[in-house]
Image (spheres, helix red, strand yellow):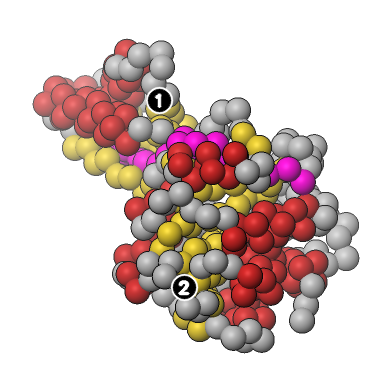
Amino acid sequence: MPTIIENRRNLHQIPEIELTTQKTAQYIENILDLYDCKIDHPIPNSVTAYFDNKKENTIVFRSDMDALPMEENTDLEFKSTNGCMHACGHDGHMAMVLEIAKYTKESNYNVLLLFQPGEEKPGGAKPIIDTQFFKQFNIAAIYGTHIYPELEKGKVYTRPNEMMAGGCEFEILVKGKASHAAQPQNGINALTACVEILQKSLDQEEKAFDNNTFHLLHFGTFHSGQAFNIIADQAHVRGSIRYYDPKVFDQIVNIIEQNMNNAIKKYKVQVNFKVNHHYPPVLNNEELFHTLYKNNLVNKLDSPVLISEDFGYYRNVAPSIFFFLGTGDTIPLHSNKFTFDEDILKKGVELYRKLLTTKIPF
């Protein structure tokens, strides 16, 4: 039976991106075949393992599986060499969930281990949920963990309600008509129309919310025009929205769309708005947090973070809570030099073992 360190290192050497985690899934399944469990694949390249303890309720431990498309630049003996890298700690997440398979008989619940591809993008949580796979279980709680730099090494942190921001990537495409700048009557200026959409949206978004409501509208790229003396026939913008309250997201989108419609009427342009990649906020179950905090299983995170994670979808299935496992003062996530002290994985497993027997408060 491989150790947690062996699993982490083996998985680190076979990184795969997005939903294309075939080798990773096969490795996980080969390990799980050593246990008395029912293995399934809700979507391609995902793996689940159900441990039936003949209990009424089931708890879920979820791990993401995917890596990032970057060349690894570390001195690790087990570094990857295929142009991809586990630069976000998902190799560690998988190793912890695989390790808990050794202890499922201790649980007061049935146990479902969930290995999900595509967390970085395009998202694997929602496709798994959409299969109705979870309907066959009476799920009491769903747990997930992310390794996190800048938090004290080996300590587990979480908080009630807002844990991580919801976020989306979007693009706006404005189409006009090219003409020479000396003949503006023959053209439709997509650049001018687009600038007005952006400026008015930013101004209105800033005024739409009070100081106690988190909201963020960001325009990151702008491309328009082919020459200095030609009226631009297209303008293309990419940006992001971040929020904790879904109503805030809806309101920001409404502001953008209103300004798009105004620009269409004023400038006679065509405008397309598209959300490409959207994760809801991670909102931890408050009762579950207080139970774990009261029993000294977790430390309280002072404030939520603005990055996004598709774990937020799982709260639509059952009460859920997400943890950060501190790596200390390490290189940031998504760096091609990222690594961590493997001893912290044992701390994550210690938490998971306690969760096997922790009474869920509902």
Q: What x and y, as percent, mark residue 242?
A: 43, 33
Q: What x and y, as percent, mark residue 17?
A: 57, 64
Q: Label for residue 149?
A: none
Q: Which residue is mark 1?
A: 215
Q: Nearer the viewer, residue 353 or 41?
A: 353
Relative to 255, residue 169 above or below:
below
Quadrant in which residue 174 is drawn: top left
- What residue is rendered at 35% in x and 32% in y? 245
Q: CA distance from mark 2 to mark 1?
A: 43 Å
Q: What x and y, as percent, mark residue 209?
A: 33, 17
Residues drawn in magenta: 154-176
- Residue 247 at least partly seen: yes
What residue type is disc 1 on? His
Relative to 42, residue 182 above or below:
above
SS at mark 2?
loop
What residue type is disc 2 on? Lys
User: Closer to the observer: label 2 or label 1?
Assistant: 2
Q: Nearer the viewer, residue 342 or 229?
A: 342
Q: What x and y, as percent, mark residue 103?
A: 67, 71
Magenta stretch encompasses residue 159: yes
Q: Is residue 4 left or right of residue 210?
A: right
- What residue is rendered at 32% in x and 13% in y? 207
Q: Label for residue 55?
A: 2
